[in-house]
Amino acid sequence: MPMRSAVRRSAPFLPAVATAVALSFLSVALPALPAAAAVTERDVLAAARALTFLEHPPRGTVDIGVAVDPADAASVKDADLIRRTIGNGLVIGDLTIHARLISRADVASSEGIGALMIAGGSMDLFREAAAVGRTRQILTVSTDPACVQAALCVMLVKSDPKVQVFVNPRVAEQDGIAFTPTFNLMIKEVP
């Protein structure tokens, strides 16, 4: 009889144990995203290089839209660093990249860009950039984990302490973005 009583007492704990075990497996399977931080030159260079790993990469000269929220000081600072890093033309292989600053108010109407890098900002800026990426089927990149976690951009790039590229495969598919098999081996997927 005492045995039965012990079993009854432990029964309520079984769901808790099962949940803890399941969560431990999930934490191993899901990549840990880096914390949000200001964009760095290495972030910009890694994002620019990612363009060459697209299944259908741009060739020649391409304008990268840099979506900036003028009301957000951190977004303005990030956008300025992106523009300065790209300078008068960042050359990567046979690709020359130019940065074009696009204010939040003009993101939806921007034309002629081959990709969109989101310089910090708010969820509203991320949503507007996501709509452009989906409509124009261009790569959307951010250094803010919230953008990729909210399924509002294809790629998250972080380079401190090492270069890490996270891709939301669902957003990539919706936006018509595909990467080379080699690049797919280097990225971490975010569900």
Image (spheres, grey):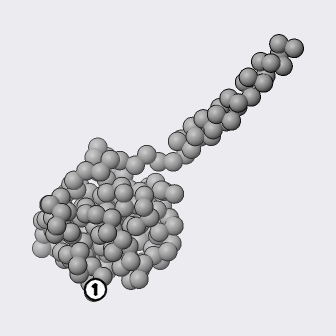
Residue 21 visible: no
Mark 1: few, some, or many residues within 10 Å (few <14, many ≥20)? few
Q: Is residue 148 visible?
A: yes
Q: Residue at x 83, y 13 (%)?
A: 2
Residue 49 picture quarter: bottom left
| Snapshot quadrant of residue 64 | bottom left
How many numbered marks are there?
1
Q: Is residue 139 left or right of residue 179?
A: left
Residue in view at x 31 percent, y 79 percent:
114
The kind of residue tagged 1 is Ser
Q: Nearer the viewer, residue 167 or 180?
A: 167
Q: Residue furthest top?
A: 2
Q: Secondary structure at mark 1?
A: loop
The front one of 175 and 97 is 175
Residue 59 left/right relative to 179? left
Can you say whether 62 is above or below 71 in the image?
below
93 and 2: which one is in front?
Answer: 2
Give the labeled residue for mark 1.
Answer: 109
Judging depth in this view, the residue of 114 and 168 nearest the camera is 168
Query: Vertical placement of 35 versus 66: above or below?
Result: above
Q: Residue at x 79, y 22 (%)?
A: 7
Q: For the N terminus, which image quadrant?
A: top right
The location of residue 169, given as percent across then percent down, is: 50, 64
Task: Name the residue: 64% across, 34% down.
Answer: 16
Image coordinates of residue 100 in percent, x first then y, are 19, 77
Question: x%, y% of residue 171?
Answer: 47, 69
Residue 143 in the image: state x and y as whole percent: 30, 58
